[in-house]
Image (cartoon, rainbow, N blue to C red):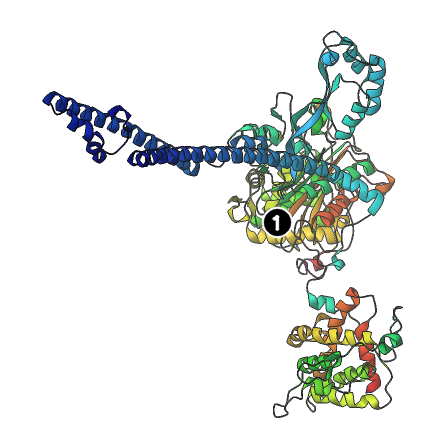
Amino acid sequence: MNATSPPGAPNASRPSAIGPSAISGATATGRLYLANLRQRSLQTARKRLMWVVVGFVFFTLTAFVRIGQLGFVSQTPDHGAAADALVPPRAEITDRNGVPLARAFPAYSLWFNPKALGPKGQPLVKTPEEVARALVQIFPDEDYADLFAKLKAGKPTYLRRRVLPEEANKIFALGEPALEFPRETQRFYPQGSLAAHVLGYVDEEGHGKLGMEEVLDARLIDPAHRAEPVALSIDARAQGAMEDELSRGMLETHAKGAAGIILDVDTGEVIALASLPSFDPNRGDLARNALVFNRASNQVYELGSTFKPFTIASAIDAGVVTDMAVRYPATPLKIDGFTIHDSHAFGASLNVPEALIHSSNIVTAQVADKLGGQRLRDTMIALGMNARPTIELPAKGFPIWPKGEWPRLRTMTVSYGHGIAVTPLHLAAGYAALVNGGIWRPTTLFKVDPAHAPEGRRVFQASTSARIRQLLRLIVVDGTGKKADASGFRVGGKTGSAEKAGSHGSGYRNKTAIIATFAAAFPMDRPRYVVIAMLDEPQATQLTSGQRTAAWNTAPVVSRVIARTGPLLGVVPDGRRDVDVSDLTPLVANGDGE
Amino acid sequence: MMVTARRLRSIGWMATLVVCVALVMVLAFRVNALRSQVHQSDAKIVALKQETMYLETEFETRANQQQLKNWNDVEFGYVAPVATQYLDNERELASYAKPVEAGAPAPIRVASADDAVVAAAAFPAMVSPLTGRPVSEASDAVDHVAVTAPVAHDDSDAPRPAHKVAAASGLAGLGDRLATVHHAARDSAKTPAHKVAAKGLAAKDKGSKARDAKALAAKKAAGQKVKSARAPVEKSPSRAFAGRAVRPKDRFASADRTSAVGHRHAGNGTPLIKLALKDAKTVK
């Protein structure tokens, strides 16, 4: 009977439950037995009770632990995997305004899978000839023989690395199951060849080559950072305008090449850097040719008359030129058996403003002679002309820098930009120092916070810089740079048309091969940007009025670039403002020259 | 009975336990279901973001700088704006407004609905909730102009309620009234504007012709503009008027012209404010 009593019943009820049987057997053994039985029953009951309690506690704990786990430990479903899918395998490169210049993009590629129709089936439905012909119709740049050979060989291979969606549709319409388009993450440059030399490209192994892709390779594929795009200092719109105008200038003059730079004078940021002819970084496989050569930062040129303002600034700074009205003889100058000429005669004498306006080699050489080789050399060194340009790009040309003490003749030729060869980027940085108050700053392709611009180093006094701003403006208003005058933008600048040195040091024999450069800054009342345009061997054409000098080919390019990019870069044209040149105007006799 | 109670109690405990277990399981299932839903949504978000990126890239590619340049060369022919196309401020904008001179030809008015028809249409009168009398737009206009006119208000002269002033008004007399405001501006020292306006209302019976509703709207708008345009004009004369001294009584007219520019550019090309000025002359 006791066995039937509920196991989990409370102890208090036990005596009453076993009471009747205890009274019926009133012997000591019976009592003992009963007491024993009671004891055991109690134990069993306690045990069972314990189990129940344990069960309750267990489930309660389980529930609490689960709730706690849901609430605190396990975050909302694991975003990791999903978010990872959005992190590109290689970080994006954008321009200064966030316009993507290079991004990882799941593009289609064209893959030939001969086993698509079963291991023993024919690889293609149609004949390889027909398929190859159809593919060439879709991709006119593909080689028929090459495609045919690949299709006939029957081995799995890429037929084309990048296919546009509409091209994929056309291929799909061919009805060949063996032609597959796997989507693969590739490097894609939405702007095509824009800023190709700045960006570079990515090779088949996924490593950057040439431009910032190479410089930033480790940063771009670093898992910790690749979710964040890298912003360059380039402005895609300004870059587009620069490339467009340069290519127009090239076409108009049948030039071999061109280079252009827009530089922020206060921060050293490169807003545009163009080298033409360019290449398409989307076809990295084709980018191994001469087109990848960067003329803006890698090729050194004798940049000619654009150096004259450096000489004059150095002379003003050193106190050699104190009076702008002092006149210098302008007749050909014989020195060490070498005669320094001007492009044409400008009369018996010229003062410094006139010398710059007419671009007189003779007067500049005399100023440099008075200045002395050492001081001119020091200025050039301070402007970084004796070292590779400071830029992140791997393509940095080393200048042709006259070593040792400069003899008199060397000082004179350097003063008008011969006997020293630098890159257009050197020139841009130098002009920035000329006009920004005299501070040279390293050029950079990374965005710079204007409040934290590099300190730079002082090359010219602020007063010298102010004087040079007047003189550069005067050159555009009255001198050789008239065609660069974008209305309302207060452009100042200097032309430079330097004959190219012949090969093997054969001197300047080829008078038709010149480097035409225009170095400008705007707006001159408060310079913000330096613009350099350079054409390599421009020809005299009808469009340049039969001239091949910078005044006729690169100056208009600069004018159009400034007119197009000025408003985008925050310079509003204003016809009522200008730098005050009234103290120099009376010193200048009217006349043109180069 | 006792046994049953105990059993019931223990069954109750068991049931509670089972219910708890069931609840925990339900919770777990629910959480898992929700979790997989979130996973699905997550995957969908990723897919959509990728699709967005894909489309964005395609858009960027199709609209890249070179492509835009090609389109511009062939289709649009846009060129960079020149210095003269930029305006520094409202003052410069105002300088483009040409003052109306004596003997100037009547301004060209573009074709629109017949004014006479509009005037005769007899818009339903707005009734003042206080007086029950009709309140026309004219009363608003008068009110407004009275406020904005550069008149040295005679404080002792209590302003009359607008609706009284407008009580006898109709569309026909608007031109007169509005024109008189100019008169008020010129003789501001003598007569408070609202009095003048009232005088103008009274004059409507003197054979004035029907004026168009457009003139009303224009004048009203011009009146509103006057308020904003007046301040800069009074501080210093605009560049356009810099050559000659701006007489006090001319100021208001200048301000009127200033505000007219916006209307001319924004509207259908009708030089509305000139119309009003002309009216002023005819009344004078």
* Horizontal and vertical percent position of residue A138: 82, 24
Quadrant position of the C terminus of chain A in the picture: top right
Of helix, strand and loop, which mostly describes the magenta segment? loop
Check disc 1 and report its element: helix, strand or loop: helix
The x, y position of residue A502, in whole percent, is: 74, 27
Residue A423 shows up from this direction: no
Left or right of residue A144, residue A374 in this image: left
Q: Which residues are magenta?
A: A580-584
Q: Is residue A50 above or below residue A571?
A: above
As drawn, A407 above or below A349: above
Closer to us: A255 or B238: B238
- Could you tell me which residue is drawn at 64 percent across and 47 percent down? A529
Which of the 4 quarters of the picture holds residue A173?
A: top right
User: Visible in this render: residue B260?
Assistant: yes
Asked if residue B46 is positioned above or below residue B93 in the image, the reply reads: above
Where residue A203 appears, x then y in whole percent?
Answer: 64, 23
Which three-letter amino acid code belongs to the residue tagged 1? Val
Confirm whether the magenta stretch covers residue B41.
no
Q: Image quadrant for the N terminus of chain A? A: top left
Judged left or right of residue A507, residue A393 is left
Q: Which residue is mark 1?
A: A435
Q: Quadrant of residue A37?
A: top left
Residue that protrudes farthest toward the front in the picture: A24
Please tell me how crowded label 1 is: few (under 14), some (14-19), or many (20+) other residues with Cα within 10 Å: many
Q: The disc numbered 1 marks a residue on which chain?
A: A
Image position of B177 with respect to A302: above or below: below
* Residue farthest toward the top in the current orientation of the protein: A120
Image spot of residue A146 (x, y percent): 79, 14
Nearest the viewer among A207 and B237 is: A207
